[in-house]
Image (cartoon, coloured by chain):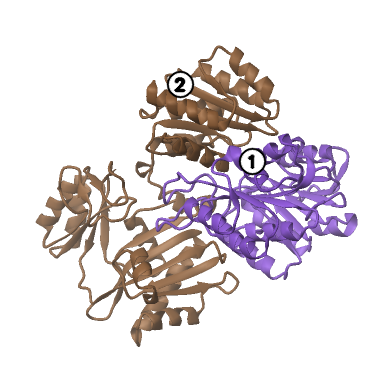
Chain colours: A purple, B brown
Amino acid sequence: MSILVNKDTRLVVQGITGKTGTFHTQQCVQYGTNVVAGVTPGKGGQMWEGTVPVLNTVSEAVKQYGANVSVIYVPPPFAADSILEAIAAEIPLVICITEGVPVRDMAEVRKALDATNGKVRLIGPNCPGIITPGECKIGIMPGYIHKPGRVGVVSRSGTLTYEAVYQLTTRGHGQSTCIGIGGDPINGTSQLDAVRMLNEDPDTDAIIMIGEIGGSAEEEACAYIKEFVKKPVAGFIAGASAPKGRTMGHAGAIVSASGAGTAEAKFAAMEAAGVSIARNPSEIADALLKIYKG
Amino acid sequence: MNIHEYQAKDLLQDFGVPVPKGYPAKSAEEVDSAIAQLGNEMIVVKAQIHAGGRGKGTFTDGYKGGVKVVKDPAAAKEAATAMLGNTLVTAQTGPEGRKVQTLYFTEACDIAHEYYLAIVLDRDTAQSVIIASTEGGMDIEAVAEKTPEKITRVPVSPSTGLRPYHCREVAFALGFEGDQIKQLSKILSGVYKMFWEKNAMLVEINPLVTTPDGQLLALDAKVSFDGNALFKHADIQALRDLNEEDPKEIEASKFNLAYIALDGNIACMVNGAGLAMATMDIIKSYGGEPANFLDVGGGANEEQVTAAFKIILSDPNVKGILVNIFGGIMKCDVIANGIVAAAKNVEMTVPLVVRLEGTNVEAGKKILSESGVALTPADSLVHAAEIIVDQVKNG
């Protein structure tokens, strides 16, 4: 009932011994995620919390422990290096939670990703992570608000995703997989990539897409939805009241001085694609349930 | 992070880009010294603020023009006296304008033609793009809209970096010949090196001019840097001018709060950037005007919430506050305790509406209602927006 991660996921945590890495790894282990190894260069040979082996390199985690997904909690100056190490180790799925990665670093990471010809997918950076409820939680989202089900959620914002998920769960609708793609201008997985995966997933019946001002990721996803998606889709865009030329918290959330990337344009693209629109964040689940009975 | 024109030109010069000789000045003494160094020639006097449209701007006392070409040192002194310390309003500053605290004096030069040259980091293709046009000296967005065929875009992949063919492509597109192709290539190499090495998001030369004797020169420049990469560049950090920033935003950055001052009167405090934007949107959709964007982050503690309340209340326009929190791993009862403690630390002078949702929401609401702090709890975000807009409008 999912895409990308499930009960067979074998997770390696890069930056497992740091404060953030430790706290969120504890939460993920409690949720039931199978954490097979951690990586902190120089601390190889230790045991994290007495339960998870700490290694010096990602490739050891792949070779010795069969890791097939990596999550990254290392500080921004070193995050791109950690992503590149995971790419070099050919881990099929890399999730970078870190906020504040320099944009130029991400331009270089994107080239390395493209060179893998699809062997490696990156989610993030600056994202809450990904969860397949009841099976596997990777990242910083509160696990218990989720419930297993058949609605897929993709979003550029953490708390807005939690709002939507909480609304779904309290209305009795579970989720197949929820993906936070992150709020940075250059990231690994786009709205379009996520929508396409959810559309092709036989265990997802409906999709929620939550966007923000800046860039054209939502417009591209809507062009795809219009042509290929028969499943019900609901959407919301944050930032309709944001001034031009200011970065609204997320590095990628900016309407350019010339007026590109507005909420208005994104809502219009959703409308043209037949997406059921929520005009405020309290109505995201209701917008879906208008067109999807579950 | 943005820098001033004079700083941008100093940097460009360090990277081998020719610019007119010039000197900045922040005081009457520095003005005299700058003018003296330029000699008895035509001088350009330029107000230094982080906003465009300076030439067509007007000062609040009615003096016209933040960029003046004058015939001699006496006229330069006169223009400088009128501009320094005065407030300049341009199309980009908003009606309140910006106080001019630095002037830049440069030699004037004769212009044969004005071009546009920039490098930006393009988010959609994840690579640098050179943008060039024969229509320099004007708003490039307007050129792009009216005559898109006059704009050349040349992408540069991070895996190859800038190569000679990129430079030739731009030079031919701008119609250069002979020695000017070499000059353009040298300029573009310097601009790209600076753009890449210093983690810039934009380096823009507008105009890049040719003089009657065929020399290329960067006459004006705008540069902005990736704030996330400043830790790599102490020299760039040193160029930050706090006079150009809102004092509330400077204070917020000390507490790791993402705060942006806006023009409205309803302040908001939210966890998460997306939810913070959505909260502003909903205030606006119910007829209010947001006073700020404020993301206190996922793990905001009492100290940060207290600082956030103080910053919000230091804005005299604020007539009400909406707190909107989704409690996830950080549970609502913990957040409610933080809000109550912070509200008791700060003298709350305006109505406060709090909407909590998520983990332990009932316990959180109970803490708020039993706290004795004058606040209105709201059941939903819509309800919260309605209440605060009503309280601010009707007292």
Q: Residue furthest bottom?
A: B178
Q: From the top left corner, tell me how far across and down residue B11 is, in percent.
A: 39, 61
Of circles 2 and 1, the one toward us is: 1
Quadrant location of the C terminus of chain B in the rendered image: top left
**Residue for point 17% across, 57% down:** B36
Decide if residue A225 is on the left or right side of residue A90.
Answer: left
| A46 w.r.t. B307: above or below | below
State which chain disc 1 sits on. Answer: A
Residue B308 makes an appearance in the image? no
Q: Are marks 2 and 1 on the same chain?
A: no
Distance from Cα at disc 2 to Cα at disc 1:
30 Å
| A29 w.r.t. A200: above or below | above
Decide if residue A227 is on the left or right side of residue B76.
Answer: right
Q: From the top left corner, tell me how far across and down residue A215 is, in percent.
A: 52, 58
Q: From the top left corner, tell me how far across and down residue A247 is, in percent.
A: 48, 48
Query: Three-letter amino acid code at disc 2?
Result: Pro
Pointer 2 and pointer 1: residues touching (CB < 8 Å)? no
- Residue A286's mark? 1
Q: Residues within 10 Å of mark 2 (few under 14, many from 20)?
A: some
Q: Secondary structure at mark 1?
A: helix
- Residue B351's mark? 2
Image-quadrant location for residue B369: top right
